[in-house]
Image (spheres, grey):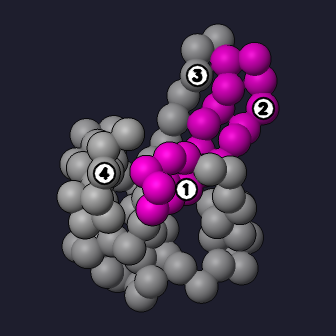
């Protein structure tokens, strides 16, 4: 089995998929298991529970599934906004 990834734009207000405040991803690992992560201001991915919380209806943020290309463009936008290039 190969790894699969689903990306989510994170909005602080419902319906604001046009200007996301963050980026999350869910990775289905090749060896089994799931890992949820957020793209951080230090331009790295770190484990986070936002996707699980959102799926349970417990998150205050709204998540919108986006494509890998859209996620790449959003990461580039955050790199410019937050500075640096890892």
Q: Residue at x 67, y 18 (%)?
A: 30
**Distance (Cα) linking label 3 and label 1:** 17 Å
* Span highlighted in magenta in the image: 26-45
Quadrant placement of the C terminus: top left
Task: Assess disc 1: are there few (<14), some (14-19) or many (≥20) residues with their C-alpha within 10 Å of its C-alpha.
Answer: many
Of pointers 4 and 3, the one earlier in the residue sequence: 3
Mark identifier at residue 3: 3
Mark identifier at residue 38: 1
Which residue corresponds to mark 2? 33
**Distance (Cα) linking label 4 and label 3:** 28 Å
Of pointers 1 and 4, the one earlier in the residue sequence: 1
**Distance (Cα) linking label 1 and label 4:** 17 Å
Element type at mark 3: loop
Q: Is residue 32 magenta?
A: yes
Q: Residue at x 58, y 14 (%)?
A: 2
**Distance (Cα) linking label 1 and label 2:** 17 Å
Of pointers 2 and 4, the one earlier in the residue sequence: 2
In the rendered image, the vertical position of residue 76 relative to residue 12, given as above or below: above
């Amino acid at each position: 089995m190969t790894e699969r990834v689903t990306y989510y734009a994170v909005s602080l207000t419902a319906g604001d998929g046009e200007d996301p405040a963050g980026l999350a991803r869910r990775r289905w690992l090749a060896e089994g298991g799931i890992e949820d992560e957020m793209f951080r201001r230090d331009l790295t991915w770190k484990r986070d529970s936002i996707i699980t919380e959102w799926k349970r209806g417990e998150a205050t943020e709204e998540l919108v599934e986006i494509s890998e290309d859209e996620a790449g463009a959003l990461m580039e936008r955050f790199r410019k906004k937050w500075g640096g290039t890892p």
